[in-house]
Amino acid sequence: MCGIVGYIGKQKASPILINGLMRLEYRGYDSAGISTIEADGLSIMKDKGRVKNLYNLEGINDLKGTIGIAHTRWATHGKPSKENAHPHQDNSKSFSVVHNGIIENYNELKKFLIDNGYKFYSETDTEIVPNLIHYYYTNNNNESGKMKFLTAVKKACSDLKGSFALEIICKDFPDNMVVVRKDSPLVIGKGIDENYISSDIPAILSFTRNFYLLNDFEYVFLSRDSAEFYDKDLNKIDKETKSIEWDATSSEKNGYDDFMLKEIHEQPTAIRETIGAKFNENSKCEFDGLDFSKDYLSSLNRIYIVACGTAMHAGLVGKNVIEKLCRIPTEVDIASEFRYRDPLIDDKTLCIFISQSGETADTIAALKLSKEKGAKTLAISNVIGSSITREADYSIYTHAGPEIAVASTKAYTSQVVLLVILAIYFAEILESDSENLVKLKKEILELPKQVEQCLQLKDKIKEFAKRIYQEKDVFFIGRGVDEAIAKEGCLKLKEISYIHSESYAAGELKHGAIALIEKGVTVVGVITEPTLVEKTISNIQEVITRGAKTLIVTNQKVDKSMFDTVLEIPETNPFISPVIATVPLQLLAYYISKEKGLDVDKPRNLAKSVTVE
C-alpha cells in the first residue's frame, strides 16, 4: 500500500524518482506525484492514475532539482484524485511531504490547525503533516539551522497517532531532507555523494547495495554526502549500513510477459536458496541464531502461527507438520483478528509470525502483543532487517529474492519449505523418530527438481484455462493438508482473475456448499494425502453427479477416466506436497487471468505490502 521514493545527490532528481515509483507499482496505488527543490522554491507534479501519467504533466521536463521526494498513493482518506495525491504542502508552500500510513487523530489535529488559521485543500489525513510542521517551525524562536527543522518535524510527529513513514523537504533547506518512520517501512540507500530513500529495497536496489535500516522514531537529516541520525529525543546516534545481497535483476522481467510468471518459474531456485546449508541427508537441521532447548520445547502448551492471506495458508501447512512431528498443539490465526480476541498467551507459548515483506502492520501488532504477554516470538520473513525481524526474539529467512507481482508465489512455497525445516529442527531437538526425519529431509532436497516437473504441465493447464476463464464461480476442495492447498489455489484465482471462488474441506460439501453445485460449475480437487484418497474421491463424485466439471491435482493412483482433467504431479511426502501441488494452481490462476486480458501483476484494489490495519 503506497510507495515512497526519495533522492538527494548531484543528478537530476525527477527521472530517478519516477523510475523508483515505477518499481513500486506492485504495491498498489491510484495516484502518483513528485516534489523537487528548484531554484525558485518547491515544485509539485502529481496526478490521478498511473505513474507514467506524470510524463504528460506540463513542466515535468523542465525540472532541474537534484533533491526530491515521490509517492504512489493507495486511497484511504479521500477518493483517488489529483487533489488527494501526494506530495502535500503547507499553506505557505514552505514544506513538501509524502506519507505512508494512517494518521488516526487527523480530525483532532485538523481542527487545531484550522483554529490557528490553516486551510485545507484535500480530503487526506496527510495534509495536516506539512501544516503541523510549519506551525511548529514558525513558532520556534529558540533554535536555528537544522535543529529548527528537525525540532519542528519531531514535535509534529509527537502529535501523530497511527503509523507513518515521512519524507520532508523545505524551501529554507535547499540541500537537505528529513525522513522519519513509525510502524511503516523506510530505508536509506547510501551511494557516493548521494542518498536514496524508499519504502521498499527493490525500488533502489539498482543504485546501491548498502542500506540504513530505520527503527521507529529515528530521525535522519540527509545531505548529499551524509546521513545524520537522531533518536526520539533528537540525541545524535550512530548507525551502520547493512549490505543487501539481492540480485538487482530480480526486479526485471527478464523476457517473461509478467513478473508473476517469472516468479512462478523462479520457485526451484528460491526453494534451493531457502534450504541452503540448513541440513543435508546425514546432518541435523541448523538455523543461525536459534537456540531452542529440549526443555523449552517440551514445556510448551501451544504454538501460535500468525499471518495474513497467503502467509496464513503457509501457516496451515506448518501446523500440520509441527503437530505430527513434534506433538505440540499448534493454532493458526489471522493476524488482524489475533490481538482482538485476547489470545491465551504466556511464557509457555511460542508465537511464530510470517510476513513476506516483514512490514505487515497487523502481524507486527500481534507480535508486540505476544511479547507483552511473555511469549517467545519467532519471525519468518523474506527481508533481512525488516520491522518484524527487528521486533521478534528470533528471526529466520526465506531466500526467495524480491517478489514484485502482488499475488505471492515463490514467497509462499519458500515459506512452506522453511516451516517444514523448522518443524524438523524442533523434532530433532525433541528426539523424535530420526529415521523418518532423514527420509523427509532427503525428499525436501528433491523439491526443486519436482517443481521443475510441475512447470512442464503449463500447456495442459493453459488448455483448461481457456475452457473455464469466462465462468463466474469455481470451487476448490481437499482433505487434510489438501484443504490448505485448496485455500491457496482459491485465493490465487480470486486475486488475479476476479472470478468468485470458494475453498472447502471436501467432507463439508454435503453440509451446505453442495447446494451451489450445478451443471457446468468447475470444481478443482486436490488429492495428495495417501490416507484420504478414497474419501476425497467420494466427495468429488458427489459434485460430478450434479454436473460439475472437474480438474484434479494429484500424485496418487486414481482412475483418471472419472475426471475431466487430471494434472499428475510427482509423488512426495504429504508434509511437503503443498509445495508442488500449489504450482499448477498458480499457473491455472495466471493463465485464466491472461485469457481475460487482465493486469496479472497489479490486480485491482490489492497491494503487495499492507502496512496499515
Image: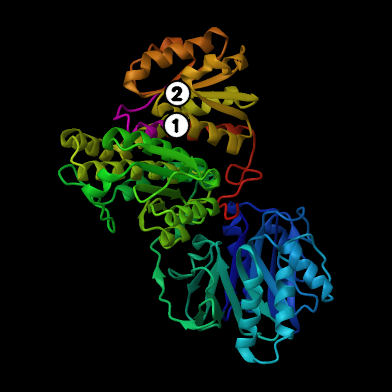
Q: Is residue 519 above or below residue 57?
A: above
At label 1, the amino acid type is Ala
Asked if residue 466 lies left or right of residue 583, the reply is right
Residue 197 percent coordinates (x, y): 55, 70
Residue 574: in magenta span = yes
Dots 2, 1 in contact, CB < 8 A? yes
Residue 488 visible from this viewpoint: yes
Q: Which residue is mark 2?
A: 478
Q: Is residue 140 above or below residue 53?
A: below
- Check disc 2: other Cα within 10 Å, few if <14, some if 14-19, many if 20+: many
Residue 512 percent coordinates (x, y): 58, 17
Residue 64 percent coordinates (x, y): 68, 78
The quadrant the N terminus occupies is bottom right
- For marks 2 and 1 on the same chain, the one whose residue lies earlier in the sequence: 2
Q: Is residue 546 above or below residue 407?
A: above
Q: SS class of the residue under badge 1? A: helix
Asked if residue 299 lies left or right of residue 613, the reply is left
Q: Which residues are magenta?
A: 567-581
Q: Which residue appears at 64% of the width and 39% of the height? A: 598
Q: Which residue is mark 1?
A: 484
Query: For residue 301, which quarter of the picture?
Result: top left
